[in-house]
Image (cartoon, rainbow, N blue to C red):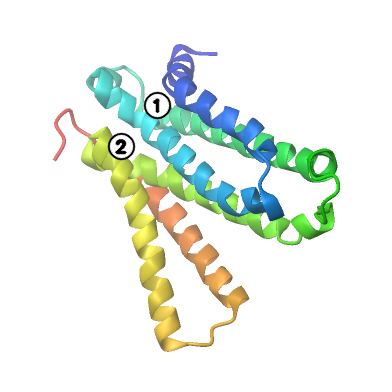
Amino acid sequence: MNALVKKEIRLLLPSWLTVLSLAIFLPWIWKPNGSVISWSPIVFFFGSILIGVDSFGREFSLGTFSWLMSQPVERHKIWRNKIAVLAVGVAIIYIVQFASYELWLHWGVTLFARGRSYTYNTLGDDWWFWVTVTAALMLVATCGGLWTTLLLRQVAAALWITFLAPVGLVLLMVSLLLRMFPSTPERVAEGVFLGLAGIYIVAGFLVARGLFYRAQDVGW
């Protein structure tokens, strides 16, 4: 493991451990009717914002970004190391929370909902939909955290814009969709949401990559 990878791990470790703890323990916080499944994607969305912003945000906060740019290493290697560490970290969190929810739905419901009418089947009806939504929101937050931090170079502003930009885009498109097609089926709305998420993820990643390759010591 080279020094750049170790540095990236140290940068992301505090926020990563926090979100990983949520991924492990959140499913076991019992809520009636399985409502923990409904709002957990939002929790991991905010957690992924922290991780995505930290990748470059801590460089700016600690004043090490100029040092990073002055290293005798090609920028594409630095970018590749950062994205590799970030991708592995987010993937581990996603897999852990997926496994934790599976354990909860198979055994936790039986242990903690004894005597109630909740079963694995009733709580897991929309399981795969929530799995997909969680993955999409985590990727949206991570890619958003990259481009906003590189553009603004201020952690607080990047956190807010990373949250507000996709939310505003979704609200705008949903309002237009409902205005144009008042009786839009739920599945169509879900497909539009996932399609917008995919476009935002690709665009955010490409914008962040371009900003990093053209980055200077002084931001705009």
Is any part of residue 124 visible from this angle? no
State the residue in front, 77 or 45: 45
Q: Amino acid at mark 2?
A: Phe
Task: Tell me the residue at 54%/35% (across/down).
Answer: 87
Q: Residue at x 42, y 57 (%)?
A: 200
Dividing the image into 4 quarters, which one contains the N terminus?
top right
Residue 139 placement, left or right of 123: left
Q: Is residue 36 above or below residue 27?
A: below
The residue identified by callout 2 is: 212
**Position of 27 relative to 192 (above/below):** above
Circle 2 — which element? Answer: helix
Q: CA distance from mark 1 to mark 2?
A: 10 Å
User: Could you classify mark 1 by the number of other residues whose Cα lies within 10 Å: few (under 14), some (14-19), or many (20 or more)?
Assistant: some
Three-letter code, disc 1 = Ile
Residue placed most toward the observer, 197 or 121 = 121
Q: Residue at x 44, y 82 (%)?
A: 178
Across and down, in percent, residue 61 comes to 26, 23
Residue linked to disc 1: 78
Q: Tag 1's secondary structure?
A: helix
Q: Is residue 63 visible?
A: yes
Q: Position of residue 89 (x, y in %)?
A: 55, 30
Q: From what the image shows, is residue 173 above or below residue 50?
A: below
- Whether tag 1 and tag 2 are in contact, CB under 8 A, the answer is yes
Q: Tell me if 164 is positioned left or right of 198 in this view.
A: left
